[in-house]
Structures are given as C-alpha cells and as structure tokens.
Amino acid sequence: MAPPSLPRFIAHLRSDAANLYALIDSARDHSLVPQMRQANIEHHCLFSGVKALTLARVAPYLVPMAALAPHLERLVPYAWGGAWSMVVRGTAGVEATRIQLKKSCLVRLPDGQSAYFRFYDARVFDRFMRIGTEGQLRWMLGDRLDGLTWVSGGDAARTRTVRHGPTRKGLWGLVPAMVPLRVTEHHWAETASPQEGVHP
C-alpha cells in the first residue's frame, strides 16, 4: 500500500528545506536515482571514487531538500517509507554532511571485521536505536549533523528524530556539559503534539 500524501509532513520539510536532506536508498528502488537524474535534481552518492561507480545502483544518496521541494507532493506518496525513509538535518553544507554520513557506512564488528552498515534504511536504524549506545549515536551525528529523522515501525505517517540535546555550561562554565540525546516522535497523519524523550 502506498504511503499517504502527508501534507503536514511535506509542509515541515519545506519550512526547513535549506537545512534538510533526504537520504535515498537506491538498493530498494533502482529507478529513483535515474528519475532524479532525468529531472536534474541535485543528488550526491555517499560513496566516492571507484565505489561510487561500482555500487551506483545500490548506493545511498544525499539529496538537498531544497532540490526536492517542488516534487514533494509526488515523491512522498511514491517513495517515503520505502527507498526514502530518512531525513538528515545539518547546517554545515552538503559536502560536510555527506562526509559525516559516509563515516557511518562502514563499521567494525566485534570480531574485528568490517561491514557495511545500512543505517539509511529505517528498518535497520529502528533496530539499531534499540541496541545502539549513546556514544555510537553521538559518533554518527558528530558535530556536523543536527539530527536524523526516520520512519518508525514501518509506518510512513510516524517518524522519530534523534538529535543533540541543548548544550549547557559544565564545570565552572568552562567545559560544555554532556547532555542526553533527545528523541522526538511525530504522527504526521494526526494533530497530536510530538512526544519527546531521552535516549536511554
């Protein structure tokens, strides 16, 4: 079943389009990136060099929301919750945002081996949020990402956002205090207020 049109969600994306990016998983829909290319929509592969060429059909792509804004009424019902299930917020620019996200694509397993981490698939990230540590999440966000929003529980009308908590002055006001990450839940098909909590 196709996701709903979600006008409140579209309005939210447009309201902060200058700082938002769509993360597209081309492995879940091989046609989406060619469609963006045909429509001259700006998009950037998270991979670089040879990998960007050899894995082009299955790679993740970062797309500035400003470039998608004119197409959201068509794109959200078509792709949100499928090949597109994550939104990134960052104010450091597209290249700095891409590099920060690229770091999370390859992780080291407990046995020392490296593996690709498909965090940009909301189904994967939903599970990771249940077992990941705060330190791991802070490493993913770094100092270049303000937050990650993803489809929660497979429901395209429901999202969760993890972001840095408000900074506080620490010891004698010299060192910023460590504050918990904030997790907010939105139900875009409803008028309910967002629910906010602290990552355990």
Image (spheres, rainbow, N blue to C red):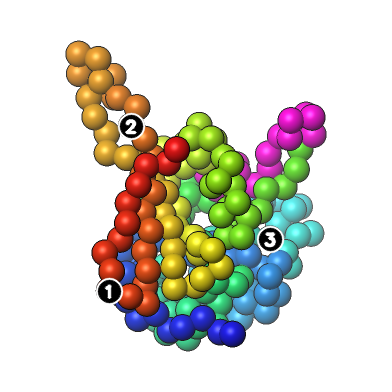
Earlier in the chain: of badge 2 and badge 3, it is 3
**Kind of residue at badge 2:** Val
Which residue lies at the image location 44% right of the left edge and 73% below the top edge?
157
Residue in front for this viewpoint, 23 or 200: 200
Whether residue 98 appears in this view of the structure is yes
Residue 191 - label: 1
Q: Tell me the residue that label 3 is attached to.
A: 59
Whether residue 21 appears in this view of the structure is no
CB atoms at circles 2 and 1 under 8 Å apart?
no
Few, some or many residues within 10 Å of mark 3 (<14, 14–19, 20+): many
Q: Quadrant of residue 9?
A: bottom left
Q: Is residue 99 above or below residue 8?
A: above
Which residue lies at the image location 63% right of the left edge and 55% below the top edge?
124
Element type at mark 1: loop
Q: Tell me the residue that label 2 is attached to.
A: 179
Few, some or many residues within 10 Å of mark 1 (<14, 14–19, 20+): few
Tell whether 130 sits left or right of 50: left
Q: Is residue 35 above or below residue 91?
A: below
**Kind of residue at badge 1:** Thr
Element type at mark 2: loop
Q: Is residue 182 above or below residue 23?
A: above
The quadrant of the rendering that contains the N terminus is bottom right
Mark 2–mark 1 distance (CA, rounded to whole Å): 29 Å
